Image (spheres, rainbow, N blue to C red):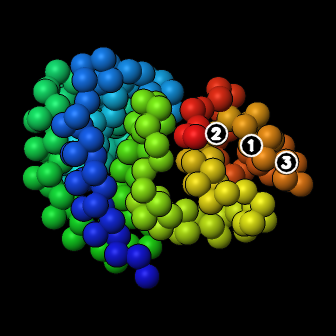
């Protein structure tokens, strides 16, 4: 069984380490998976989610209004403050998700951590950081197991692959079945794929 709390801690450590190395140009890069946000704003989101969850500020979650409010409140803050806020909530958040069968905050940081890597043309995040999420979601699309690399299915499950990219997998699923893979609905814009 996955230790979701530890996986969350591991992501916070990795995101914090990455954030400390980013240039102003990288921080200003638009993240294609979340086209309204820059890398800096994704970091603001990752700081805001645990703060709001732990404070019970969940009105409208996980909708766009809820996420945009958290980002807007942090948009002008330096990266160091965002990292500090994220780190200050790590243990409480990790404790809150430890036994959850669907730990939304862990899945959220895994997805957005990967979004940043792909937006910046960085290699994939380490397998140990995305594979547990992919494994947890595997039952949603058992017909694709073995047909599609686990990483690609992980990304598509969170609507991080376009319809065209998914059709290029060459599976025997219909377009409608492929659309159903995407938790947040299908998308038309191709997403960056790590080499």
Kindly identify which residue carries mark 3: 170
Which of the marked residues, 2 or 1, is nearer the chain's N terminus?
A: 2
Which of the marked residues, 3 or 2, is nearer the chain's N terminus?
A: 2
Kindly identify which residue carries mark 2: 161
Q: What kind of element bears circle 1?
A: helix
Percent x, y for residue 183?
A: 60, 49
Question: Residue 97: which quarter of the image?
Answer: bottom left
Question: Residue 41: which quarter of the image?
Answer: top left
Percent x, y for residue 110?
A: 41, 52
Query: Callout 2: few (<14), some (14-19), or many (20+) C-alpha neighbours within 10 Å?
Result: many
Q: Identify the residue at horizontal 65%, vertical 70% (top origin).
A: 139
Tag 2–tag 1 contact (CB < 8 Å): yes
Report the side of 194 relative to 147 (left or right): left
Query: Callout 3: few (<14), some (14-19), or many (20+) C-alpha neighbours within 10 Å?
Result: few
Say the numbered circle drawn on residue 166: 1
Q: What kind of element bears circle 2?
A: loop
Tag 3–tag 2 contact (CB < 8 Å): no
Say the numbered circle drawn on residue 51: none
Percent x, y for residue 1?
A: 43, 82
Q: Identify the residue at horizontal 22%, vertical 45% (top origin).
A: 17
Report whether residue 102 is seen.
yes
């Amino acid at each position: 069984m996955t230790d979701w709390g530890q996986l969350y801690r591991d992501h916070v450590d990795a995101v914090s380490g990455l954030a400390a190395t980013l240039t102003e140009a990288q921080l200003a890069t638009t993240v294609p998976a979340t086209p309204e946000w820059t890398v800096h704003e994704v970091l603001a989101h990752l700081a805001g989610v645990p703060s709001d969850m732990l404070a019970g500020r969940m009105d409208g979650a996980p909708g766009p209004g809820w996420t945009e409010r958290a980002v807007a409140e942090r948009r002008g803050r330096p990266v160091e403050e965002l990292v500090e806020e994220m780190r200050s909530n790590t243990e409480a958040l990790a404790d809150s998700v430890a036994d959850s069968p669907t730990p939304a905050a862990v899945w959220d940081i895994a997805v957005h951590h990967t979004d940043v890597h792909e937006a910046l043309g960085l290699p994939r995040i380490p397998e140990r950081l995305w594979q547990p999420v992919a494994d947890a979601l595997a039952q949603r699309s058992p017909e694709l197991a073995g047909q599609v690399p686990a990483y690609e299915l992980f990304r598509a499950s969170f609507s991080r692959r376009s319809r065209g990219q998914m059709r290029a997998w060459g599976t025997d699923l219909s377009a409608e079945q492929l659309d159903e893979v995407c938790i947040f609905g299908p998308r038309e814009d191709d997403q960056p794929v790590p080499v």
